[in-house]
Image (spheres, rainbow, N blue to C red):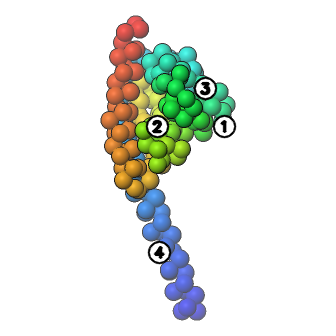
Amino acid sequence: MIRYFTGLLVLLSLSISTQAQAQLRPMVYSDATVDADIEEVWADWTTAEGLESFFAPKAIVDGKLGGAYEVWFLPDAPKGQRGAEDGILLGWQKESADGSRMIQFTWKMPPYMPEINESMTVVQLWMIPSSKKKTRLRLFHTGFGDTPEWREAEAYFEKAWPQILSTYAKHLSETD
């Protein structure tokens, strides 16, 4: 009986340790409020036309779960060098009681990071209406490993995502 409880305690402590480590994985977070209603923001982030209006010259969005979600910064470059290629739409929340929406997709590392370039991470973007004409964006980027290459990628996205959200806010202010 004592051996059973000891084994159970060991398993429980390993489970808690594993869960704690998962919670400590690196994550990039960015937040911005933009001057646009939730419908416009949703369309900009969930369609190729929307993404191409502010993010990159070429986007491929297949609006179904498991469909393509690709953002090509260099569309004329060879495969593997164009940008966030081979991404997929993992999920979305189109309606909620508070009016917020969410899109979740995979994201590839930059081509200049060959050790981890083929690895996919996950981006989750929450769109929360803060008034009829303003939407708060909360972006979470997860799935980074714990090697020097991954730490470099995390540092890259800690700078890139705020810049992208800022560019998006500027785009919206110029289109009004």
Q: Nearer the viewer, mark 2 or mark 3?
A: 2
Dot 2: few (<14), some (14–19), or many (≥20) neighbours within 10 Å? some
Q: Which mark is residue 13?
A: 4
- Determine if residue 66 is in view: yes
Separation of marks 1 and 2 at Cα, in angstroms: 23 Å
Mark closest to the chain's N terminus, 1 or 2: 1
Tag 1, which secondary structure? Answer: loop
Residue 55 screen position, x and y as percent: 45, 22
Mark closest to the chain's N terminus, 2 or 3: 3
Dot 3: few (<14), some (14–19), or many (≥20) neighbours within 10 Å? many
Q: Which mark is residue 61?
A: 3
The residue pinned by badge 2 equals 111
* Three-letter code for the amino acid on which mark 4 is drawn: Ser
* Three-letter code for the amino acid on which mark 1 is drawn: Gly
Q: Which mark is residue 104?
A: none
Separation of marks 3 and 4 at Cα, in angstroms: 43 Å
Separation of marks 4 and 2 at Cα, in angstroms: 40 Å
Q: Residue at x 47, y 34 (%)?
A: 125
Separation of marks 2 and 3 at Cα, in angstroms: 21 Å
Residue 150 screen position, x and y as percent: 41, 50
Q: Residue at x 47, y 74 (%)?
A: 13
The residue pinned by badge 1 equals 66
Q: Quadrant of residue 129?
A: top left
Q: Quadrant of residue 93?
A: top right
Mark closest to the chain's N terminus, 1 or 4: 4
Tag 4, which secondary structure? Answer: helix
Find out whether the residues at labels 4 and 2 contact each other: C-beta distance under 8 Å.
no
Mark closest to the chain's N terminus, 4 or 2: 4
Find out whether the residues at labels 3 and 4 contact each other: C-beta distance under 8 Å.
no
